[in-house]
Amino acid sequence: MKKWFLALAVVILPLLSIQTAQAFSVSPLKYEITVDPGTSELLKVTVGNSEATTQQFRLTSVPVTMDETDHPQYGVAGTEASSWLKFEPTQYTIGAKGKKEITITINPPAGIEPGTRVVAVVVQEVADNKGTVGLSPRIAIPLYITVAGKVSEALRISSWQPVQKVFSSLTWPIQLTLRNEGTVRVPLLGKVVVKNSQNEAVSEKIISLGNELFPNTNRSLSLTVIGEKTEPFLPARYTVNVLIQYGASKTVLNSTVVIWVVPVFWWIVGGVFILIIIGIILYKLFFKKRKFVSPV
């Protein structure tokens, strides 16, 4: 009986010491806005306290960049847009089950280059009056700021390379890297066309390139391209062309690589041929050595 009581105490006591995370809500969860350089725009964010006690919240802004896999990176150096946001005040008290509408001022400086920037508005619970800190949950609201003016769309295919030049099958891993060198984010559409040595299209496929690509951002994709349905009997040469359409202008870029397919049968034939050549060479060397050996 005493063992059961000790086991129950080991399970229950840690649970009693865990502080429940305080909950809140934020609306909207994403903002997109266009603003002229040197002017101010106001945004409204509603924060709701879901707890039965009064809570305090703090608003901050952090820069956002997109990595090569199209995932946001918060708080790393990238855009100056986080300094354009002002919160007055930066900390708010919201009563139990209450809501508060918070005003955010966006003020890009005059003369700033037109284009798209990304910043995050971070809403976070702060310590209560007793100085107790809970799990400090936070919510980041992506804010897409487009500075009005003449913008440029410029995309570059940095790399379109297979992992190797010669394959034994019709399945080819190819690495694609894109870079947005313009000033605005651009939507992307892609297609891969495979042609044989007679320049006949034997395969076409629409490829997914992810979400819009932000300015001064790279995107790397690992693609698997499949050639024609029937494997060739003889070694064959293929060209693989990628076509990328981007932006409102629907400009199309393309890049081509050459791939050779040597079926397994010919690898075996080649291996046997090499072994025969090696055997002939060794035989001649051995025969020549015996020929010039003096009799005892």
Image (cartoon, helix red, strand yellow):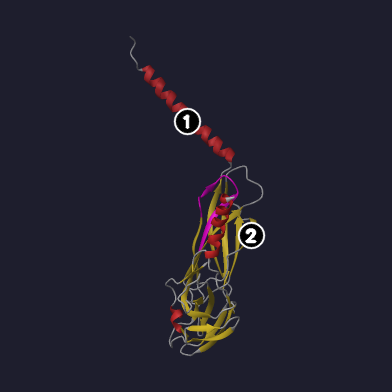
- Magenta span contains residue 172: yes
Q: Nearer the viewer, residue 260 or 197?
A: 260
Q: Callout 2: helix, strand or loop?
A: strand
Q: Residue 132, relative to residue 12: is it above or below? A: below
Q: Nearer the viewer, residue 79 or 156?
A: 79
Q: Residue furthest right?
A: 229
Report the number of numbered marks: 2
Q: Nearer the viewer, residue 252 or 19?
A: 19
State the image coordinates of residue 155 (x, y, percent, origin top left).
Answer: 51, 70
The residue that disc 2 covers is 205
Judge left or right: residue 18 versus residue 290: right
Distance between the alpha carbons at the discs numbered 1 and 2: 44 Å
Q: Residue furthest bottom?
A: 39
Task: Report the predominant secondary structure element of the magenta stretch.
Answer: strand
Q: Residue furthest front?
A: 1
Task: Specify the amino acid type for callout 1.
Answer: Ile
Q: Quadrant of the C terminus?
A: top left
State the image coordinates of residue 137 (x, y, percent, origin top left).
Answer: 52, 72
- Mark 2: few, some, or many residues within 10 Å (few <14, many ≥20)? few
Q: Which residues are magenta?
A: 162-177
Residue 235's quadrant in the figure? top right
Q: Residue at x 56, y 53 (%)?
A: 7
- Magenta span contains residue 271: no
Q: Which mark is residue 277?
A: 1
**Mark 1 or mark 2, whichever is nearer to me:** 2
Residue 174's quadrant in the figure? bottom right
- Mark 1: few, some, or many residues within 10 Å (few <14, many ≥20)? few
State the image coordinates of residue 24 (x, y, percent, origin top left).
Answer: 57, 76
Q: Nearer the viewer, residue 185 or 82?
A: 82
